[in-house]
Amino acid sequence: VLPILVSFAFTMFFGSSQMSNKIESMKAAEAALISFANRYKGIYHSLPAFLETKTHSLELFDTPIPKSSLPIKEQKCQLYKDQNETFTMHGIKVTSHVYESHITSLKEEEKREEYPLVVLHGYMNGALYFYRNLLGLSNYSFKGTVYALDCFGWGLSSRPKFTIQADQKKQPDLDDHLLTEQVFVESLEEWRKAHKIEKMTLGGHSMGGHMATAYAEKYPDRVDRLILISPAGVPDDKDDDIESRIKDAPLRFRLMFGLAKRVRNWGVNPALILRNLPESKGRSMVERYIEGRLATIKCPEEKKHLGEYFYTNAALPGSGEHALNKILKPTAFGVKPSVYRISELKVKHVHFIYGEHDWMDSSGGVEALKLSALRKSEGKESPEIRVWGVSNAGHLLMLENWKEFNSAMVHANGHGHRLSQHAPTPFKVADEASTGMFFKRSVFRRRRDE
């Protein structure tokens, strides 16, 4: 009992100062990554000397989100104590001062109405996971403006305890999955309204891709194009198929799967584990993760600040992380696979982008393409879908091969012709002309062979 009382007393007396220190550490890591962003402008054209000095403006901002708009039962934020009627969405805005010079030479028929890009990060990530991409992406497309947001419950956005609750009078039929989606969808919609953005190109990485799909489903008139970057929860791995495979698996695997299932139901997740490890152990794990998963980052200082950003993001109080077991099964497949939803979206263009060595199943994007082609053959409305691949990259493709990722994003927005001959070209995995068949260079060839 004594250690528990001591821990409780320590939290009571020093908890707020600890929280302040963590928030400041997160801000410092964010600022450091922003300074590194200036190294990754991704400009493949020579610039006039006067433009070399200031090519972009970067602005950090906080946007108030009405608490009444979200189905969150616990209204108290664990980060910011002075919030009454609103939560906060944190983000960064990048504006290119060279965008106009890049498109002035285009023929009128090559121009079309453009919209800013809004990107959502994945699980245990944050807005600054796109620090290598923000400036370059703003140069050739997206009306010269890119926003990256800390999704609700992550980064420096508000972090209330993730206790979802439906309004029984207005939404009696919503289950936990749909309520969880609504938290992210409605916080994004309130953010959009606050910034008076009539329409946007919406991108989402991993779990952010799942939430971007849910947003486009509910608010299609606000989305010009949807870009899904190695999105989570797309393929359908049917429960009966899982059970049959588990039944014939070795005993050790069956035991591990059973434990994973129980742990998921208890609400245990990677961020929770990392947060409760001794700090030295947690930081060591993050350093090994950065070293192993992001070997293309060579600069020691860059690794250090990215590791600090990752660790502090997880060390701050848990919130959005608890959406994991409501969206994904223990197998990492979707509770309600979005492959069926994507082909029915009212958005005209949907593009998937995967890394060549991505562990996320790119067959989900191809299957969505097939379903879309089937709907069109039946005379039904369906998006134009394409699936792209980025060489020498895995799931964190925006960091592992930032130049080709940027090119893929510009191609996905229909502006590949604006890139110079020196820009790397992403490869096509599948498009409507291929009717869903893999091209010779498939991002998933390795796993398919296995």
Image: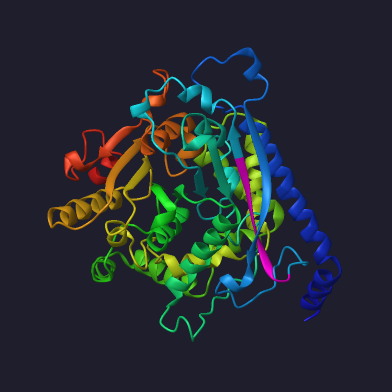
- The N terminus sits in image quarter: bottom right
**Magenta region:** 84-93
Does the magenta portion include 91?
yes
Q: Total of numbered circles in the picture? A: 0
Measured from the top left, where is residue 194 in percent x and y?
60, 57
**Residue furthest toward the bottom?**
169
Confirm whether residue 160 shows in the render: yes
Confirm whether residue 356 shows in the render: no
User: Which residue is at the front of the view, 237 or 385?
Assistant: 385
Measured from the top left, where is residue 222 in percent x and y?
44, 54
Quarter of the image where one finds residue 237: bottom left
- Tell me what residue is drawn at x 18 percent, y 43 percent: 437
- Tell me what residue is drawn at x 47 percent, y 54 percent: 208
* Prevalent SS, magenta region: strand
User: Which residue is at the front of the view, 350 or 274?
Assistant: 350
Q: What's the image's color scheme?
A: rainbow
**Residue furthest toward the front?**
108
Measured from the top left, where is residue 357 in percent x and y?
37, 40
Does the magenta portion include 90?
yes
Quarter of the image where one finds residue 319: bottom right
